[in-house]
Image (spheres, rainbow, N blue to C red):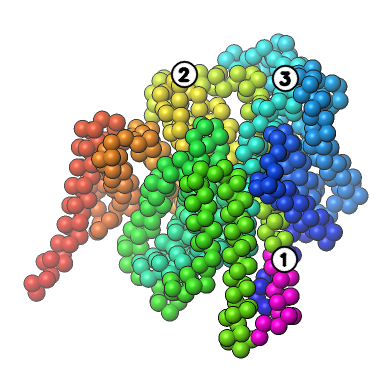
């Protein structure tokens, strides 16, 4: 059997996340393929109305969720399990079908909902809560339940007795059950609101694009390219991890997925080269988190930021390039410093791929990315761009295989028989089916996170909680911007312990976004970028650092120690957003000379801070130099040009002195 055929069979067998009967696995594949084809149809052929698109998408997603995640977890369903899951599967279909079938009548009622509307709304909310519990965990579900109870509290609410449990600032008038259900199920600010709208359009199409790249071998291509570029340098595998994770971040959309894919190759090599297990796992976790802030996809964040701020998606991508380079450059520098301190060398050339050979074998993966970027620059809708990018992946993969079987293999003595052509076509169909199914399965978690976030957003809008939270934030910070940013960071860390990054960002921006923008004067786009960046910190911040834990599992190190290392290497995640706030020109633009100056001093500050933490750059740094870096870095982040210039001069002097001291022994030894 040929390699494409073997790969196709292997991928097609990977139909679910649990050991389930084969009919269920085939059902998962069938539903996934149907959902992906529906999304492609609505993205590139016939766009659908808001409620049609979102309700059908969510129904498909919930059916997939209940098929993939049985009610009793890994245990066989049994009769009781199938009765429960069968009921939820039927309710998932009914929730969307009712809206699609009765949408015109519902709109004509314009708020005067029928009893059937309310009962279907209650059913849908229950199903969404259960699906979120299975797909993304109990914490998110509990937050949704608390939000619903909060919406029903109040003197005029359906549960007035809950008012006694609320602090004075949190109290509100209350809502009836009909009004709350109408908001969550039949309104545009509930389950079918903006978060799910973005998930059902832009996010899904690009997740599907990533799935097509993944099943055709793009992940291995990016990893091999990173190794070929950096493998010979000191700490080569660690540097390759940084570059490969940035590339994979544009495919997987998940820091944890980045860790387990690139980390399976890079972490063992880092350990072999001399990195401690905890360092190897921490480097991979920090680098993989960088994939979530790296354009063009930025996980799901770029699309959500674009929708919330009404800034074109391509502009979000463009302004995010330099901050992403700064973050990945800081991680890269940490890796280099550790390698130099330990006297590491690169990998032998015979163990590394050659750039020319890697590009020869995988050039087809670069073309779709160029097509994607070109179409974005042409101001096409991101949904339509994703559609054409997916078709380009299929086209180049087909052409590549056609050239191999019809031209290259016959030259090597293998004739292009009808049997071989038919076998390759069958393998191609299997890979196509797997890509469609994998894209749908990969979208389940983010779509359910957006649906349950819609519940929270709907309650926030109905009760005015956002304004109340902003008032509390101003009160706690005393109007001090630095304290306000620290509060946002702490809130994101707490939320991130139980929520996916996308959900954490949505909840945070709804709660603190108005205060950051209106009360503290932070430009809207920068406020969203700050919240989005801080929403990533739960991946690398102890005590619960999910990407760090994944890295520890591969490295065979202690989770907490690995998380501490990840937290250290990811320092740019905390400092760069602050720099955006106090130097908005780096995002919003300004005089060219000042934007360039701002970019240079930010890179200088991050480099000096990394050197001070490790105590090494060109050579060892003494304690005085390391301590002086702190006030100089603070000065660089100051909005005053004179102060930041003085800080930059100070940092440059400290690093220049370190360079001179590192060269002095060599200079002294030269005459002899």
Q: Residue at x 16, y 57 (%)?
A: 660
Residue lying farthest to the bottom in this orientation:
413
Q: Is residue 85 above or below residue 516?
A: below
- Asked whether 3 or 402 is in front, the reply is 402
**Marks 3 and 1, Cα distance to the nearest angstrom?**
51 Å
Q: Residue 12 in the image: x percent, y percent?
A: 73, 64
Q: Residue at x 49, y 51 (%)?
A: 374
**Please, what secondary structure does the residue beneath circle 2 have?**
helix
Identify the mark at residue 154; answer none if there is no mark. Answer: none
What x and y, as percent, mark residue 614?
A: 33, 53
Q: Which residue of the protein is positioned furthest toward the left in this rendering?
A: 671
Nearer-the-camera pick, 490 or 248: 248
Residue marked by disc 2: 475
Q: Is residue 597 left or right of residue 387?
A: left
Pick the quarter of the image with the C terminus.
bottom left
SS under mark 1:
helix
* Range drawn in magenta: 415-431
Q: Main secondary structure of the magenta part?
A: helix
Would residue 607 be visible to someone looking at this image?
yes
Quarter placement of the N terminus:
bottom right
Q: Which mark is residue 152?
A: 3
Q: How many marks?
A: 3
């Amino acid at each position: 059997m040929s390699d494409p055929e073997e790969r196709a069979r292997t991928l097609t067998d990977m139909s679910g996340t649990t050991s389930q009967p084969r009919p269920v696995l085939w059902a998962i594949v069938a539903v996934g393929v149907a959902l992906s084809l529906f999304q492609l149809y609505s993205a590139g052929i016939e766009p659908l109305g808001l409620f049609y698109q979102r309700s059908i998408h969510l129904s498909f997603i919930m059916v997939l969720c209940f098929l993939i995640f049985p009610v009793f977890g890994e245990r066989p369903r049994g009769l009781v399990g199938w009765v429960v899951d069968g009921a939820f599967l039927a309710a998932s279909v009914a929730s969307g079908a009712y809206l699609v079938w009765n949408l015109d009548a519902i709109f004509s009622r314009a708020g005067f909902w029928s009893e059937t509307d309310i009962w279907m709304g209650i059913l849908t909310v229950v199903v969404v809560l259960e699906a979120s519990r299975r797909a993304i965990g109990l914490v998110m579900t509990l937050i949704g339940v608390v939000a619903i109870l909060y919406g029903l509290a109040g003197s005029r609410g359906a549960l007035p007795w809950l008012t006694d449990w609320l602090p004075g600032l949190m109290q509100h008038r209350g809502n009836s059950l009909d009004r709350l259900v109408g908001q969550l199920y039949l309104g545009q600010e509930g389950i079918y609101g903006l978060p799910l709208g973005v998930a059902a359009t832009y996010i899904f199409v690009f997740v599907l694009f990533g799935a097509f790249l993944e099943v055709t071998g793009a992940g291995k291509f990016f990893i091999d390219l990173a190794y070929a570029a950096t493998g010979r340098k000191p700490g080569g595998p660690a540097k390759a991890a940084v570059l490969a994770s940035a590339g994979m971040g544009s495919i997987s959309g998940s820091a944890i997925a980045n860790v387990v894919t690139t980390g399976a190759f890079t972490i063992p090599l880092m350990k072999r080269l001399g990195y401690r297990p905890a360092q190897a796992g921490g480097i991979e976790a920090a680098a993989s988190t960088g994939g979530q802030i790296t354009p063009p996809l930025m996980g799901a964040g770029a699309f959500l930021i674009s929708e919330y701020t009404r800034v074109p998606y391509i502009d979000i991508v463009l302004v995010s390039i330099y901050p992403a380079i700064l973050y990945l450059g800081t991680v890269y520098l940490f890796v280099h410093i550790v390698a130099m301190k330990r006297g590491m060398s690169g990998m032998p050339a015979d163990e590394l791929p050659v750039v020319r050979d890697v590009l020869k074998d995988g050039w087809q993966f670069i073309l779709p990315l160029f097509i994607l970027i070109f179409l974005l620059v042409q101001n096409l809708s991101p949904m339509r761009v994703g559609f054409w990018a997916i078709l380009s992946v299929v086209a180049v993969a087909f052409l590549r295989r056609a050239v191999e079987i019809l031209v290259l293999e016959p030259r090597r003595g293998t004739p292009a028989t009808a049997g071989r052509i038919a076998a390759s076509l069958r393998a191609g169909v299997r890979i196509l089916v797997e890509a469609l199914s994998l894209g749908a399965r990969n979208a389940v978690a983010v779509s359910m996170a957006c649906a349950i976030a819609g519940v929270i957003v709907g309650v926030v809008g109905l009760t005015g909680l956002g304004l109340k939270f902003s008032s509390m934030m101003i009160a706690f910070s005393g109007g001090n911007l630095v304290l306000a940013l620290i509060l946002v960071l702490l809130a994101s860390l707490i939320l991130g312990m139980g929520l996916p990054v996308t959900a954490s960002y949505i909840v945070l921006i709804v709660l603190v976004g108005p205060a950051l923008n209106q009360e503290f004067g932070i430009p809207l786009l920068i406020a969203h970028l700050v919240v989005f960046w801080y929403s990533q910190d739960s991946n690398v911040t102890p005590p619960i650092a999910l990407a760090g834990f994944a890295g520890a599992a591969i490295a065979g190190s202690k989770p907490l120690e690995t998380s501490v290392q990840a937290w250290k290497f990811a320092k740019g995640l905390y400092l760069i957003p602050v720099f955006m706030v106090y130097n908005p020109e780096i995002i919003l633009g300004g005089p060219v000379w000042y934007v360039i100056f701002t970019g240079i001093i930010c890179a200088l500050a991050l480099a000096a801070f990394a050197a001070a933490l490790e105590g090494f750059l060109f050579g060892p740094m003494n304690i005085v130099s390391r301590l002086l870096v702190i006030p100089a870095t603070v000065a660089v982040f100051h909005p005053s040009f004179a102060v930041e210039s003085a800080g930059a001069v100070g940092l440059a002097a400290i690093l220049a002195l370190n360079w001179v001291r590192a060269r002095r022994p060599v200079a002294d030894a030269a005459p002899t």
